[in-house]
Image (spheres, coloured by chain):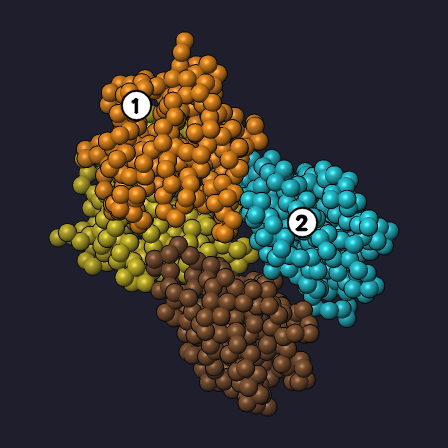
Chain colours: A cyan, B brown, C yellow, D orange
Amino acid sequence: MHVKVLVTGFEPFGEEKINPSWEAVKNLSKEINEAEIIKKRLPVSFKAIKKKLPKIIDESMPEVIILTGQAGGRVNINVERVAINVMDSKKEDNDGYKPEDEPIFENAPAAYFSTLPIRRIVNALKHNKIPATISNTAGTYVCNTAMYVALHHTTLNGLNAKTGFIHVPYIPEQVLEKTQPFMSLEMIEKAIEIAIKESIKS
Amino acid sequence: MHVKVLVTGFEPFGEEKINPSWEAVKNLSKEINEAEIIKKRLPVSFKAIKKKLPKIIDESMPEVIILTGQAGGRVNINVERVAINVMDSKKEDNDGYKPEDEPIFENAPAAYFSTLPIRRIVNALKHNKIPATISNTAGTYVCNTAMYVALHHTTLNGLNAKTGFIHVPYIPEQVLEKTQPFMSLEMIEKAIEIAIKESIKS
Amino acid sequence: MHVKVLVTGFEPFGEEKINPSWEAVKNLSKEINEAEIIKKRLPVSFKAIKKKLPKIIDESMPEVIILTGQAGGRVNINVERVAINVMDSKKEDNDGYKPEDEPIFENAPAAYFSTLPIRRIVNALKHNKIPATISNTAGTYVCNTAMYVALHHTTLNGLNAKTGFIHVPYIPEQVLEKTQPFMSLEMIEKAIEIAIKESIKS
Amino acid sequence: MHVKVLVTGFEPFGEEKINPSWEAVKNLSKEINEAEIIKKRLPVSFKAIKKKLPKIIDESMPEVIILTGQAGGRVNINVERVAINVMDSKKEDNDGYKPEDEPIFENAPAAYFSTLPIRRIVNALKHNKIPATISNTAGTYVCNTAMYVALHHTTLNGLNAKTGFIHVPYIPEQVLEKTQPFMSLEMIEKAIEIAIKESIKS
């Protein structure tokens, strides 16, 4: 069987010039454990995510969807448990949009749980000496929206795709002038690779 | 009209000898802005909460339900946005129970949003110079379970009760031997009172 | 005997409109336990401190000198142990001065220890349920300079004055739009009063 | 010219089974930029440090002394600026000793500044994309004592040795079960190597 895995990272936002999620994703091999890896860079835009992400999913029809994003200030790999139906931000997205307490979709569920094997991924990461934890909030910025949109889309359309989100820390070059935790890009890449391998296990 | 408000705090847990949520709730007046205040102390027990909290609600039939709990380490009043259908803890509850990734109820929604006016409460708190913020995770310990159980119960039974959860910091006497943020008990009491007043507004 | 206590706070700096140290000091009684309290507001200026603080001390000839300042981000009362002979800052002082690794005084000691009864003060604060700790760094900004200048001056001139520095957290009105720890102004005032009382004990 | 560099790390303490400082130091080459690297593991004992460290220095007569230690909770390489004449700890050292506010040596200076080129080291680390900062406190545990003892000994005996201390974060395998910042062992090793190279520059 030929398994397809969609893996996304984000473009930079705020004052950052790079986004470690995309830096890591773009370096992944095209094939991991015989699975085809489809890599996409997502815009940091609430509105664009709602339009583009379902199309990207429909075009690739993956069995596994792993979205990744930067979580500045978090100390380790955060495998997200849940996405909530809220957009709320004090900082503008890259389109200049700054929602307050808005639903992503009207009349949609309050939340979706990740359908990735999140506990198994965290355990596999620790087994490989990569600090990791399950996170119970993906925030209310564009990352959470992407996770919600992907899970809403696969659920509504009955797609058989394990879907979830992984937040990664800053990488060293981002924290040379601020006192913030970080993880090497190599470790982040390895973490995403391990998450892929765990997710494609039957 | 005679409005009834159910306000709960928790018993102490872990190494703490008091729980600031109950210390604050027990000091509240019996009547606030003509509303009757019904105060209850809840056990820090996943299983007991599932049994007892629905009964407490049914007995008092309140128009407003404000659950409160201690969030050690948080710096200000956290008005919770959402409760998720998960019980997960590394520390035992007061019954010695330590669930991992368990649902609170099988085949129930992933999450419920607070039906309290959370943004208005936070704004009213700040207006009164009480540091406060909306929180996007109530954790996965007994506090989150209580919030989920209350919202699930009122939703399933069509009760017309605005329902939500407020996390409060440690009080000073709890942090004399640890370097942790805190808030005075008086300020916590005032915060809960303000939350009640905002919630009973038509 | 008539004991004189010099107590100082600072003017605001950075983006703050008030400085909790001066807000607290200016509210102190003129007499505490029969000691005369002399209150002065200090400028947030490396250069002005070096000129003005020795004059203020010489004019009042106090038996106790308690300098206080704001330490945004610290969670409790920090009774400082030591001042070091360095001025180093990434942010400008109120005169636009931003020193890097400069000595306060050439050919002067690397550091001075506080001559206040710091352990006794911390214990008295805790006894009064005020969270407090001994701090081992007053930083390298103007607060540390003031502490160093006062101790250097009293030492060089053989003045018999117990001298030290107390850092205080933000007060609530400063942290309504940022997630930072804080302490009520009343508690800060009480803390300084307790520090005075402990320091004037024979 | 044949330069000798003494580099030390500590044995584990508290609940840790390894100490990243010694793990890194023991892996260093025996020769770096033509300098001979003398590596020693130090005990986490206030009393043993005072006895043994001067002997180690006298036996090797190094031109550069770089002491390193673990600073759990710190996020990056901390090049220490100053050692103070205090031993104060709430946790016992590996000999069961727990001093409170004791001087390391009676009638000795309050502090010594590092004589390493600390700013140049930090800049070189950042240039190599290793997060680093100057720290203004080495604490009051055994690390600070070691730094003070080394500087006191070289000063009293007129030894011509650049001397200082570098605190390093946890490594990944130490933080798999706690949410704490960390740095890879490889990066710590590289950081110490860079510190050595900068320190032996004429």
**Residue at (78% x, 64% y) in the render:** A155
**Residue at (66% x, 46% y) in the render:** A194
Chain bearing mark 2: A
Quadrant of the drawing holding the N terminus of chain B:
bottom right
Report x, y in % for residue D190: 51, 28
Indicate which disc residue C110 carries: none
Chain bearing mark 1: D
Residue B187 image-quadrant placement: bottom left
**Residue at (71% x, 53% y) in the render:** A201
Residue type at mark 1?
Ile
Q: Considering only vertical position in the picture, is A164 above or below D94?
A: below
Q: Considering only vertical position in the picture, is C109 above or below B150?
A: above
Tell which of B28 and D48 is nearer to you.
D48
Q: Residue furthest right?
A: A59
Helix, strand or loop for disc 1: helix
Tell which of C114 and D165 is nearer to you.
D165
**Residue at (46% x, 77% y) in the render:** B43
Quadrant of the drawing holding the C terminus of chain B:
bottom right
Q: Residue furthest left?
A: C1
The total of numbered circles placed on residues is: 2
Helix, strand or loop for disc 2: helix
CB-based contact (under 8 Å), mark 2 and mark 1: no
Residue that carries the numbered disc 2 in the rendered image: A195
Residue type at mark 2?
Ala
Q: Callout 1: 10 Å neighbours few (<14), some, many (20+)?
A: some
Q: CA distance from mark 2 to mark 1?
A: 49 Å
Residue that carries the numbered disc 1 in the rendered image: D57
Q: Is residue D134 visible?
A: no
Report x, y in % for residue D52: 26, 30
